[in-house]
Image (cartoon, rainbow, N blue to C red):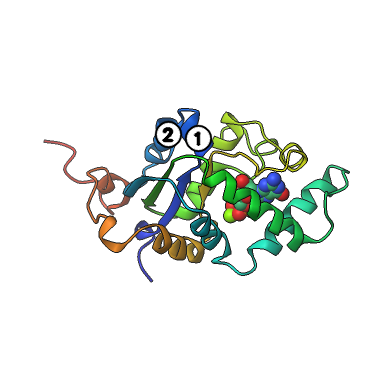
Amino acid sequence: MAHHKKERTLAIIKPDGVQRSLIGEIVKRYEKVGLKLVGLKIIVPTGAHVEKHYTLDPEWKKNVGEKTIAAYKKQGVKPPVEDPVEQGENVLAALKKYFTSGPVIAMVWEGAHAVEIIRKLTGGTEPRTSDVGSIRGDYVLDSYQMSDMDGRAVRNLVHASGSIEEADSEISLWFSDDELIDYKLVQEQILYDVNIDGVFE
Ligand code: GDP
Ligand code: MG
């Protein structure tokens, strides 16, 4: 098994994040925790690319539908549709519009537990209920109810891979090998080396 410090994940600043001038703020949070940026590009995705991204996992439509329907029920509100796959289809159509509405920033971050750490800093899918202190909790106020009522995707600023497997396949979809740079950050010595050597002169 590769060392934890070699784990990589994909994060994408969605068009609303770019439009709201939050690129620097979002990058800062991932950077400050100690992760290393190994790939970065600004790109306007096509609808076909977005569909591929979200259907890399054949279960995604069902999972996204189940998650949303459960969130509605928890709030004692009737979901717009009862069938999770149908909800997933609707979300996918909305996501294609959302992601193609302007440039996005695609990034690959590397470091210990990168997938989990980036998900934690990003926060839960629905900004209305995501934790205070997370990017989605601090910078946006959207909800499943409001976005479904208006027939659009939840605007939550960032996409972040949900698991190591998801990260591996998403990174290959967005980046070629020669767009990812292997290099060292000086601070890695302090984050990962067994002994903190070379501090005193
Ligand atoms: P994520 O991994 O936290 O981004 O969430 P998912 O993979 O489950 O969903 C992908 C994206 O679809 C989310 O980030 C939202 O932008 C959007 N989305 C998810 N569920 C819903 C929903 O029930 N309604 C609407 N309108 N958008 C949704
Ligand atoms: Mg997801």
10 Å crowding of disc 2: few (<14), some (14-19), many (20+): some
Type of amino acid at the residue the image marks with label 2: Ile
| SS assignment at label 1 | helix
For residue 154, the mark is none
Which one is earlier in the sequence, the residue at label 2 or at label 1? 1
The answer to whether residue 89 is left or right of residue 105 is right
Q: Quadrant of residue 6?
A: bottom left
Asked if 1 appears above or below 61 in the picture, the reply is below
Q: Which residue is mark 2?
A: 23
The answer to whether residue 48 is left or right of residue 30 is right
Residues at marks 2 and 1, CA–CA distance in whole angstroms: 6 Å
Q: Which residue is mark 1?
A: 17
Asked if 6 appears above or below 31 in the picture, the reply is below
| Coordinates of residue 14 in the picture (x, y in percent) | 50, 42
| Coordinates of residue 20 in the picture (x, y in percent) | 50, 28
| Coordinates of residue 123 in the picture (x, y in percent) | 58, 42
Quarter occupied by the C terminus: top left
Q: Residue at x 20, y 46 (%)?
A: 197
Ligand 1 within 8 Å of the CB at mark 2: no
Quarter occupied by the N terminus: bottom left
| Residues at marks 2 and 1 touching, judged by CB atoms closer than 8 Å | yes
Q: Residue at x 44, y 31 (%)?
A: 25
Asked if 72 appears above or below 161 in the picture, the reply is above
